[in-house]
Image (cartoon, rainbow, N blue to C red):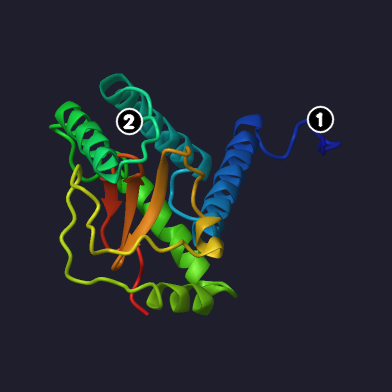
Amino acid sequence: MRNSNPGTGRDPAPAGEARRRLHAALIAGLIWVSALWSQTSGPAAPAHDVIADFGTRVSQYLELRGKEAGSPSKASTSSQRLVEQQQQMAARIRGARTGAAQGNIFTPGIAAYFRHQIELALRGPEGEKIRSSLRHSEPVSGLSLRVNDTYPAAVPLQTMPPSLLQRLPLLPKELEYRIVGRDLVLHDIEPNIIVDFISGAIPSP
């Protein structure tokens, strides 16, 4: 709104100064909104960008998996044959991912997002129920995880608490999340291998 000085016909402040003030106000507003969002919603990067990056990395893994390991194995009544198929598939995937390391999918930014989502779930009204569920799922401590390793036979494939699972990005049917001790594992079901993991994803009580 124009507020002219009747005596001179000119604005009390030059147009450039008005623009600078408006720009400063907008920047201050953005800083305030960003600070508020970071306190309530997560890491500095927008959540949709983090989730999109995670989805892209998961898709790239599955594309490589399909190229190297082929279609899912046909059902067999022989448990020995099923084990052989699983081992063969795992070997082909490992051969194609010889340079894979922790953080290839759970990059620092993605891992920070996951940790924050897990922390929100544990601080929420279902937090104690989630911890109780994890405690009763035969937690394992002191286990060393490595990318491309077989998921440890001694570690139970417990069901993820739904109120925790709903905080995390959806996965394709070939993959699932698992908790091993305080680590979050991205598990490839059919070949039974660890695709990636986040160390200490579950905060201490």
The amino acid marked with disc number 1 is Gly
Identify the residue shown where x is 40% and y is 42%.
175
Q: Is residue 56 above or below residue 117?
A: above
Query: Which residue is denoted by mark 1 in the rendering?
Result: 9
In whole angstroms, how far apart are the C-alphas of marks 1 and 2?
A: 68 Å
Residue 73 image point, x, y percent: 35, 30
Q: Is residue 21 above or below residue 42?
A: above
Q: Give the residue displayed 47% in from the left and 37% down from the top.
A: 172
Q: Left or right of 38: which side holds 87?
A: left
Please tell me which residue lies in front, 53 or 67: 67
Q: Residue furthest right?
A: 6
Element under label 1? Answer: loop
Callout 2: helix, strand or loop? helix
**Residue 126 shown left or right of residue 173 in the figure:** right
Q: Residues within 10 Å of mark 2 (few under 14, many from 20)?
A: some
- x and y percent of residue 168 in the render? 49, 52
